[in-house]
């Protein structure tokens, strides 16, 4: 298993850092880009999203780091970070799992698509804990390692937010 398990305090800390960086980004966005930003936010978990997380766990085995993430945040919408990043809600992950099944990734017994970017590329977390990115905008093409863990994925996303012009 690469790295340590994600804990709720790390997710809360990541969210606070992301919110602070997003605030700075939104303040400079219009002057820098010449048009207003979209809605960029990391939403806290709610009773409804916690019920959706429970339903997702009942539907299929999911990596514990993903469960931890969803107990703290319900989703993230970052359309103005790079070409856009979206952490899907647990309800959306369950809906996609029912429709498409797990991502087919060699070496992973199960991989759940939990996020995407603005180009349609998908991010899946495998039972190994690694995060994979599709090489095309498809559920059925190849995936390559994008991060060694969900913690690493969140740290990469933080850097993208902080380094956004």
Image (cartoon, rainbow, N blue to C red):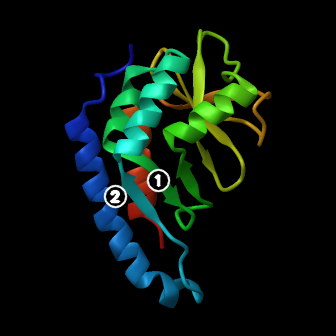
Judge whether residue 94 can be spotted in this image. Answer: yes
Which residue is located at x 65 percent, y 39 percent?
Answer: 122
In which quarter of the view is residue 53 placed? Answer: top left
Residue highlighted by disc 2: 18
Which mark sits nearer the N-terminus, 1 or 2? 2
Residue 157 pos. (x, y %): 44, 50
Q: Name the element at disc 1.
A: strand
**Quadrant in which the N terminus is drawn:** top left
Residue 119, above or below 115: below
Q: Name the element at disc 2.
A: helix
Residue highlighted by disc 1: 76
Which residue is located at x 32 percent, y 63 percent?
Answer: 19
Residue 155 pos. (x, y %): 37, 44
Q: Residues within 10 Å of mark 1 (few under 14, many from 20)?
A: some
Residue 37 pos. (x, y %): 53, 78
Q: Could you give the CA–CA distance between mark 1 and mark 2, rounded to whole angstroms?
A: 10 Å
- Labels 1, 2: front one: 1
Q: Which label number is shown at residue 108?
A: none
Outermost residue, left side: 9
């Amino acid at each position: 298993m690469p790295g340590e398990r994600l804990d709720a305090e790390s997710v809360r800390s990541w969210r606070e850092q992301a919110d602070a960086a997003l605030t700075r980004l939104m303040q400079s966005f219009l002057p820098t880009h010449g048009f207003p930003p979209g809605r960029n936010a990391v939403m806290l978990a709610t009773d409804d999203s916690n019920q959706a997380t429970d339903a997702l766990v009942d539907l299929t085995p999911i990596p514990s780091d993903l469960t931890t993430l969803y107990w703290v945040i319900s989703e993230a919408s970052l359309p103005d970070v790079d070409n856009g990043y979206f952490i899907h809600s647990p309800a959306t992950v369950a809906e996609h799992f029912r429709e498409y099944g797990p991502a087919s990734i060699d070496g992973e017994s199960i991989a759940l698509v939990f996020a995407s970017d603005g180009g349609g590329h998908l991010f899946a977390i495998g039972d190994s804990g690694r995060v994979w990115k599709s090489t095309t905008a498809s559920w059925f093409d190849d995936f390559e390692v994008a991060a060694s863990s969900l913690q690493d994925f969140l740290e990469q996303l933080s850097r993208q937010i902080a380094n956004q012009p």
